[in-house]
Image (cartoon, rainbow, N blue to C red):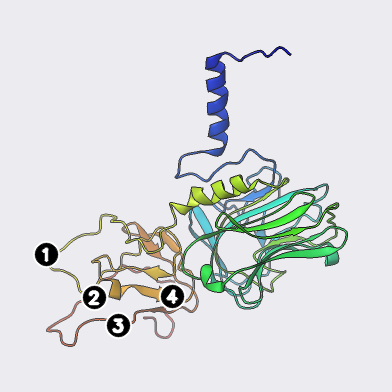
């Protein structure tokens, strides 16, 4: 058998081209050389709609959703969405899974509540439903599909693994034979189910809820659906791409805030790089870290980022101040939108 060698320079060019397809700069989301079904990066919206940046037209739009239930904020890569209360973010394309024989879900999530069931994505067509969700009070991460009957690959987890105030990468694949579920780049569940994947029905796809029930609570970024089953190595690469940026406990970076010749008792700048549910005192006193029960959206502020507060919220300190003070001064930049009653 005769083997023809490729000239060395061409070999180098091809190798670099393939590398670039799957290894961008760490500041950019990893791009996989695999066919996308849909991809919502949540970086930009138009008219209240979040576009499917795969180019396949599966744009997502809120329906019968209260104001403030879906808010855009800074994410792990670019922007992300923060979900709270009841919401419906609908993909009005009943045939979106037609002809699909393999499948991968990939998403970065920062959950704040896993009671009951919390959906990452669901298309509810009876037994032919497609779902990827947290279930049973955060003790299961499940992929549900119809292959010779409906089944779920239920991967056991501990709620505290993902309720630590950090981003987590969730993925699930089906390759025509085996369903697999991954958390933070590691396979945590698998179920053999050979056969033909079947989907179909009039139901829309819904991001982060079951048509307004089982609503995801927290932040979500980089939700992708692929038309093929990604390899374990690729799933691991997706996780590693975002892991270095996942710094919920890092002190916020300086954004040019003015300094005085007096050391403040506390200084919260709100410049954490994401919708983390904690805010750090930038003087470095860990005892003055304040924590909320849900994600805190950040938006552009006077200096760096600012908190964008809506509805009900509580950002609590375990303790504050000293026993006695000769005097005290408060300083804050605020942009209120409602001053009815009392506003603290």
> Label 3 vs label 1: CA separation?
25 Å
Q: Which residue is mark 3?
A: 319
The answer to whether residue 124 shows anywhere in this view is: no
Q: How many marks?
A: 4
Asked which secondary structure carries label 2, the reply is loop
Q: Is disc 2 surrounded by few (<14), some (14 to 19) or many (20+) residues within 10 Å?
A: few
Give the number of the disc on residue 261. Answer: 1
Q: Which residue is mark 2?
A: 330
Hey, which quadrant is residue 94 in on the image?
Answer: bottom right
Residue that appears at 66% across and 13% down: 4
> Label 4 vs label 2: CA separation?
21 Å
Give the quadrant of the C terminus. Answer: bottom left
Q: Which residue is mark 4?
A: 292
Whether the residues at callouts 3 and 1 have beta carbons within 8 Å, the answer is no
Does 313 sit left or right of 267 as displayed?
A: right
> Label 3 vs label 4: CA separation?
14 Å
> Label 2 vs label 3: CA separation?
17 Å
x, y percent for residue 273: 40, 58
Discs 2/1, front? 1
């Amino acid at each position: 058998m005769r083997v023809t060698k490729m000239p060395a320079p061409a070999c180098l060019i091809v190798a670099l081209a393939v590398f670039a397809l799957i290894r961008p700069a760490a500041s950019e989301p990893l791009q996989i050389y695999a066919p996308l079904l849909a991809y919502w990066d949540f970086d930009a919206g138009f008219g209240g709609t979040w576009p499917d940046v795969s180019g396949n037209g599966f744009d997502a739009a809120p329906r019968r959703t209260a104001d403030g239930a879906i808010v855009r904020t800074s994410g792990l890569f670019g922007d992300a969405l923060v979900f709270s209360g009841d919401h419906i973010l609908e993909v009005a394309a009943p045939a979106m899974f037609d002809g699909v024989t393999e499948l991968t879900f990939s998403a970065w999530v920062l959950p704040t509540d896993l009671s009951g069931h919390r959906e990452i994505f669901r298309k509810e067509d009876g037994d032919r439903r497609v779902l990827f969700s947290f279930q049973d009070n955060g003790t299961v991460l499940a992929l549900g599909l119809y292959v010779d009957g409906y089944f779920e690959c239920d991967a056991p987890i501990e709620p505290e693994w993902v309720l630590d105030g950090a981003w987590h990468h969730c993925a699930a694949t089906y390759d025509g034979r085996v369903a697999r579920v991954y958390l933070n780049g590691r396979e945590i569940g698998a179920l053999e189910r050979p056969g033909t994947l079947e989907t179909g029905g009039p139901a829309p796809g819904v991001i982060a809820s079951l048509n307004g029930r089982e609503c995801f609570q927290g932040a979500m970024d980089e939700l992708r659906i692929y038309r093929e089953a990604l390899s374990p190595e690729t799933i691991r690469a997706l996780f590693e791409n975002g892991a270095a940026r996942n710094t919920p406990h890092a002190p916020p970076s300086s954004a040019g805030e003015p300094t005085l010749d007096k050391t403040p008792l506390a200084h919260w700048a709100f410049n954490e790089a994401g919708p983390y549910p904690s805010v750090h005192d930038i003087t470095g006193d860990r005892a003055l870290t304040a924590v909320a029960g849900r994600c805190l959206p950040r938006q552009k502020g006077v200096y760096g980022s600012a908190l964008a507060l809506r509805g009900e919220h509580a950002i609590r300190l375990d303790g504050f101040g000293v026993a006695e003070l000769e005097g005290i001064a408060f300083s804050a930049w605020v942009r209120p939108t409602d001053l009815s009653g009392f506003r603290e």
